[in-house]
Amino acid sequence: MDKKFEKISEFKLSDMSAEYYIDKERNIAGISLVPDTEKKQSENRRVSVQSLVQLKILGDRYPGQYFGGLSMKYSESAEKMKYSHQKSETSPDGIVVKTYLKDDRGTECVHILSHREGESFIKVGTELINNSDKTITLEMISSFSFFNISPYTDGAGTMNLYRARSRWSGEGRLVKELFEDLRLEDDWTYFNSNNLRFGQVGSMPVKGYFPFMLIEDSENGIIWGVQMGIGSSWQMEVTRGDDGACISGGIADREFGHWMRKVAPGERFVTPEAVISVVEGGVADITHRLLSAQEAALDVPECEEELPVIFNEYCTTWGNPSHENIAEILQKIKNRGIDYFVIDCGWFKQGDDVPWDRSMGDYEPSEKLFPGGIDRTVSLIKENGMRAGIWFEIENVGERSRAYEEMRDCMLTRDGQTLTTVNRRFWDMTNPKTKEYLERKVTGFLKEHDFDYIKVDYNETIGIGCDNEHSLGEGLRLNINAAAEFFRQMRREIPGLIIENCASGGNRLEPMFMSLSSMASFSDAHECAEIPIIAANLHRLILPRQSQIWCVIRKSDSTKRIAYSVAATFLGRMCLSGDVTGLDEEQWETIDTGIAFYKKAVPVIKSGRSYIYENRSASDRHPTGWQCVIRDGEDMTLAVIHTFEGKHDNIKIPLGKHKRIDSVYPGNADVCAEGGYLIIRSAEEFSGTGVILRD
């Protein structure tokens, strides 16, 4: 590193070190995160310190280097933020490091790094304080900004970016790309910074990408990881103007997310936190570290500790639940180890001509579907030994509800017009009148009818944002934060409430909403061949104990097909649905033994480390080949194998800690453990197998 750089401080954080540097000529402070390693940092690299806080204030010069429209980093605002001082506070629990930056007009930024003893990640965020006598307007501010990645390599073709791509019913696909392919090489003059800015705009924060990225130095086997908890528009960036990369991110900025924020004199603005880690290892090692941050934030009712089995009637009644058909279902599923029964959408329909997805918002149980009142149905569920759950779409309003027009003053607007999509509007969750209405219609309803569980669905996105004194993007952020507070308020009002996070399946699988929920619907891929592929993807992004995986059984299913579906649920939480009233004894035997296997595997699903092995085609929808997820735990290892199209003999998978086969599902699976490998000697295409191994 250039001699004009000086190390301010260094903090040992478990097996990582945070190194703070200052560019003495510019008085700019930056931060680098490195692992404990015997590898030496290169002395031949040309690297510039980049500020640990990136921001853009309205009126300051925008960045040059052809960045207009591509990035708002490296603006005059960031260059004006000079290093002031640093404070660290230690306690038996850990350390908090605060780095203070100030400009000459009274704007102060505090970069906050926190780390708890024994944790394998750090948290970072930024607090901005306006100490001037004038309001300032932010156009961008970072939650995190780290430079000098990777300090160990001089070579070309050694740096990779991993991102988790996502779409409806196709969540969490990990994509690996070379820096060269992304045009992130330095140029011949070191004059121009190259960048990649990506993220998600709207209220479905994982609709295109998860707020997650990994940077890998493949030459040295070192990998950095970042994950953010944010339910509204967000962005991440990789920039490269020299031999080191800089990674940064936070709220989606003015260019990317239509976001600006006024900060009045004396006011503070605090960014969302980011979780960051680095390790000498691979993808499985760094994602396990990021997931440990989600584990630390987990707060679930005591009844969730055994990862109970769920039955959701949606793929049985397809939006037409009634007391009559629920009673019929209960007769077939009682005494089978199913713990929760969820009444899904449609319970509020006021007529056969009104679809459920156009009538939510009034939330009055249908007298036709529940002629004795919904209390009668709840009582029946509990009499059959299950906790009762019910579906709501809290934040959206259907066009056929009364509330759609009668409470229009409580809906979000854009450009002064009520924000309307094909058949939905959106509650203004910051409006006190909205809060009072939803407390009565949702929280009050759950209390009155003694529900234990709420499935909170979300089936449309707000898009770029909504009217607000600051900006469309800030309107969106505040509305989503108010929705998150409603989740918290429900938990306060109903201690022990089980909350399922759903957004057309998996469009809200990010750490903030996951921390407010017991579990989440992993996807809307209800009956697809790719279910185990999606479920495996999510092992890198959310805790398996929170990943609720659909197992939809049809009366036409063979026992092989049933085992394929049941085995997929071993990759997370088991959620059953389908034609349960029409199954024969052999089909039920396959399900019952699967439930028993799942319950035996709960300890390692709940707490373990995942490794994904696969030899399959690029297509998720039409897969060929095979996949195996090894879940290593303290007392057992779980292997979940799925084959797809093609012939499958003698598949060999490296075993984890435990080598002796204890249990196999289904019982006719042809597997053995030899020489440190799990061997599938022969398997038909589209088969599913679970194996528990012990010492």
Image (cartoon, rainbow, N blue to C red):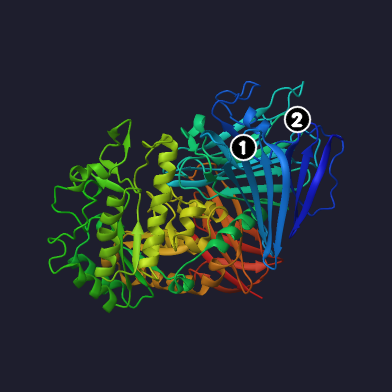
**Foreground tag (2 vs 1):** 1
Residue 28 coordinates in the image, percent (x, y): 73, 36
Viewer can see residue 528: no
Instruction: From the viewer's side, name the closer residue of 575 and 199.
Output: 199
Residue type beneath disc 1: Gly
Viewer can see residue 662: yes
The structure residue drawn at horizontal position 70% and vertical position 68%, both measured from the top left corner, is 92
Instruction: From the viewer's side, name the closer residue of 503 and 283.
Output: 503
Name the residue tied to disc 1.
106
560, above or below 157, in the image: below
Which mark is first along the chain, 1 or 2? 1
**Picture quarter with the N terminus:** top right
Q: Is residue 421 left or right of residue 403?
A: right
Q: Residues within 10 Å of mark 2 (few under 14, many from 20)?
A: many
Residue 312 coordinates in the image, percent (x, y): 33, 62
Q: Report how far apart the C-alphas of labels 2 and 1 lie in the structure.
A: 32 Å
659, above or below 560, in the image: below
Name the residue tied to disc 2.
242
Residue type beneath disc 2: Asp
Residue 604 coordinates in the image, percent (x, y): 57, 69
In terms of secondary structure, where does tag 1 sit? loop
